[in-house]
Image (cartoon, rainbow, N blue to C red):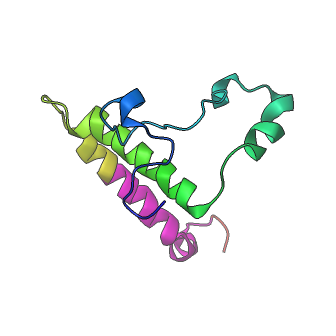
């Protein structure tokens, strides 16, 4: 599988039009239905290669696009998602500098 190709599991005769937000691999138990005793086995079944992680991030991005950005009557929600996400990101990367500006009661 090269960069930009369809997933190996995708078959246009079976699946129809390609949807970038859909996982075409073998279906597994959803994480919300996994029991505590089965978490280790569930995690071991995940594909942890860089291309699989990139595919998961890409699918999440396209699900977000289809739900919030691309509808005909898209609201202001995607703007606020980006704003608050960037605020959280910049807070995390600047936390080392910000923690020195705390106000302590006793010096």
Residue 82 shows in this picture: yes
**Residue closer to the observer: 59 or 71:** 59
Horizontal and vertical percent position of residue 21: 39, 39
Quarter-of-image position of residue 50: bottom right
**What residue occupies the far right of the structure in this picture?**
37
**Residue closer to the observer: 99 or 95:** 95
Residue at the spot 49% in from the left edge and 57% down from the top edge: 54
Residue 13 vertical position relative to residue 95 in the rendered view, above or below = above
Residue 77 shows in this picture: no
Residue 104 vertical position relative to residue 15 in the rendered view, above or below = below
Residue at the spot 49% in from the left edge and 37% down from the top edge: 24
Secondary structure mostly seen in the magenta stretch: helix
Residue at the spot 42% in from the left edge and 66% down from the top edge: 90
For residue 22, side relative to residue 16 (left or right): right
Q: Which quarter of the rendering shows the C terminus?
A: bottom right
Horizontal and vertical percent position of residue 104: 62, 66
Q: Is residue 23 magenta?
A: no
**What residue occupies the far front of the structure in this picture?**
13
Query: What range is drawn magenta here?
Result: 83-104
For residue 68, side relative to residue 56 (left or right): left
Horizontal and vertical percent position of residue 29: 67, 27
Q: How many numbered marks does the figure carry?
A: 0
């Amino acid at each position: 599988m090269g960069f930009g190709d369809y997933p190996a599991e995708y078959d246009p005769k079976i699946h129809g039009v390609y949807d970038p937000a859909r996982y075409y691999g073998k279906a597994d138990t959803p994480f919300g239905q996994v029991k505590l005793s089965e978490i280790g086995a569930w995690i071991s079944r995940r594909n942890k290669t860089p291309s699989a992680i990139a595919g998961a991030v890409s699918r999440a991005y396209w699900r977000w696009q289809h739900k919030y950005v691309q509808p005909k009557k898209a609201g202001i929600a995607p703007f606020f998602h980006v704003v608050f996400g960037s605020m959280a990101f910049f807070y995390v990367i600047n936390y080392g500098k910000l923690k020195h500006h705390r106000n302590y009661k006793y010096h």
